[in-house]
């Protein structure tokens, strides 16, 4: 078997070699990766036929470009030959060999020249970095590295290059609506602050901040500047105090809407506390385990229950339990979102809080107190005519979680930041004259 494999591999290499000879790799390169001022001079297989090297030379009589000011400048000397990795094909790696010139620039002094296919920092050519970065959006970084026989670090480098280019070249304005949310990225309460644009025609990740503090959220406003911040009309957030404080300070003109998803989540959490405590208490007192396996019956929306869960819920509702009363309060609150007028919604909210405060169920009372304290923000949801419901933010946050899982690698802030901008930032990409797919 091994021998057959070897023969097959050998035959394929000879075949590729023949094709490359017949088509002439340089002709292909001139067609799809041509740069004025430079010529592909010769190509050759390495002795093991694992890779092809293509020698690149400056075109006769064309001046080098200064990498400091992008102006032509007289040559100074040559640096030792460097290898730039190009997009591999048919399992064969391709390298450009080039001796970078240094120029004597009137403005910048003696600096290395600028070459159109790459830069001083990366071993990979721009085309290859863009190619890898595109795949890294579809596959995990690890899978991308495996697919193209390169390393995870090279993929990370490629993504970093594309993201930095995109951040430098993106257009921010106009931003009409933003949503801010936090996401946990490591054990031990490590959070990121994510700011999304949630305009109707454009949703994208605008900013990633470390931690979820006043300072981290303020970082976003530093990036966009006061002018843009003053044009934001809607801000959607949860009830996290530092966010509320920054929004008051930086976006006082905007209508601030509390995120519906977070309010529902808070209520579910309170209900779950009630259920767990009551269930424990009943067990301690030796009662029938009425609340066993009741968790999803009370937490899920009624329409999402399985028929068995529905049956179980109906059974449960017959008892005068705290859990049941808390459940009914939670279900009752769903009506709040269906109002159109802020006035009526406000009256409903007041009545619901009044009832809940008399329920003697502490976790629910806590919710009522919170809602009362944020009454004005709650009602902004209706003033915005529900056009920026939190569904958008929640959807984006779910995508962010998927991205975090896929980038694996190291859970450092820098890597996550790159991965998130890359998949959710809708950043512009450097353009190539040819699409390599
Ligand atoms: Zn210069």
Image (spheres, rainbow, N blue to C red):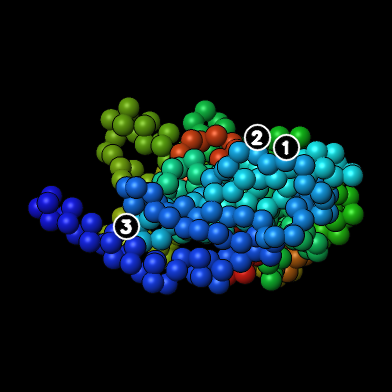
Residue closest to the eye, 88 or 377: 88
The Cα atoms of the two marked residues, 1 and 3, are separated by 43 Å
Residue closest to the eye, 93 or 351: 93
**Residue at x-position 54% and y-position 49%:** 97
Q: Earlier in the sequence, mark 2 or mark 1?
A: 2
Residues at marks 1 and 3 touching, judged by CB atoms closer than 8 Å: no
Q: Earlier in the sequence, mark 3 or mark 2?
A: 2
Mark 3 lies on a secondary structure that is: helix
Residue 285 drawn above or below residue 4: above
Residue 213: quadrant of the picture: top right
**Residue at x-position 62% and y-position 69%:** 433
Mark 1 lies on a secondary structure that is: helix
The Cα atoms of the two marked residues, 2 and 1, are separated by 6 Å
**Residue at x-position 82% and y-position 58%:** 232
Which mark is on residue 291? Answer: none
Residue 380: quadrant of the picture: bottom right
Residue 154 drawn above or below residue 53: above
Report the residue that reaches farthest toward the left: 1
Q: Mark 1 = which residue?
A: 216
The Cα atoms of the two marked residues, 3 and 2, are separated by 39 Å
Q: Is mark 2 within 8 Å of ligand 1?
A: no
| Residue 243 visible in the displayed image | no
Residue 416 in the image: x percent, y percent?
Answer: 56, 42
Residue 173: quadrant of the picture: bottom right
Which mark is on residue 211? Answer: 2
| Residue 340 visible in the displayed image | yes
Which mark is on residue 309? Answer: 3
Residues at marks 2 and 1 touching, judged by CB atoms closer than 8 Å: yes
Residue 170 in the image: x percent, y percent?
Answer: 73, 59
Q: Earlier in the sequence, mark 1 or mark 3?
A: 1
């Amino acid at each position: 078997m091994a021998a057959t494999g070897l023969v097959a591999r050998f035959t394929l290499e000879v075949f590729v070699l023949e094709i490359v000879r017949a088509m002439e790799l340089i002709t292909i390169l001139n067609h799809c990766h041509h740069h004025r001022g430079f010529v592909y001079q010769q190509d050759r297989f390495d002795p093991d036929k694992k890779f092809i090297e293509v020698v690149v030379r400056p075109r006769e009589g064309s001046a080098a470009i200064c990498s400091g000011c992008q102006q032509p400048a007289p040559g100074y000397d040559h640096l030792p030959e460097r290898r730039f990795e190009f997009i591999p094909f048919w399992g064969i790696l391709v390298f450009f060999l080039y001796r970078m010139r240094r120029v004597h620039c009137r403005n910048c002094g003696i600096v290395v020249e600028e070459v159109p296919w790459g830069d001083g920092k990366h071993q990979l050519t721009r085309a290859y970095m863009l190619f890898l970065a595109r795949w890294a959006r579809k596959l995990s970084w690890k899978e991308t590295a495996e697919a193209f026989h390169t390393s995870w670090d090279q993929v990370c480098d490629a993504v970093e290059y594309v993201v930095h280019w995109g951040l430098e070249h993106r257009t921010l304005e106009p931003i009409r609506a933003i949503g801010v949310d936090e996401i946990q990225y490591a054990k031990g309460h490590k959070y990121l602050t994510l700011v999304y644009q949630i305009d109707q025609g454009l949703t994208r990740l605008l900013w990633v901040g470390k931690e979820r503090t006043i300072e981290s959220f303020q970082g976003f406003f530093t990036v966009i500047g006061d002018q843009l911040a003053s044009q934001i009309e809607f801000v959607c957030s949860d009830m996290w105090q530092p966010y509320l404080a920054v929004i008051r300070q930086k976006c006082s003109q905007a209508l601030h809407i509390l995120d519906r998803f977070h309010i529902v989540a808070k209520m579910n959490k309170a209900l779950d506390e009630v259920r767990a405590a009551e269930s424990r208490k009943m067990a301690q007192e030796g009662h029938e385990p009425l609340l066993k396996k009741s968790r999803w019956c009370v937490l899920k929306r009624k329409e999402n229950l399985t028929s068995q869960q529905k049956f179980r819920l109906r059974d449960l509702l017959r008892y005068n339990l705290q859990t049941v009363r808390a459940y009914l309060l939670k279900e009752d609150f769903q009506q709040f979102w269906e109002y159109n007028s802020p006035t009526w919604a406000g009256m409903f909210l007041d009545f619901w809080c009044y009832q809940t405060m008399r329920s003697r169920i502490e976790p629910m009372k806590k919710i009522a107190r919170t809602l009362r304290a944020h009454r004005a923000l709650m009602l902004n949801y209706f003033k915005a005519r529900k056009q920026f419901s939190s569904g958008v933010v929640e959807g984006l946050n779910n995508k962010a979680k998927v991205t975090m899982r896929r980038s694996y690698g190291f859970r450092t802030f820098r890597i996550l930041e790159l991965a998130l901008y890359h998949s959710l930032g809708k950043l512009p990409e450097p353009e190539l004259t040819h699409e390599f797919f």
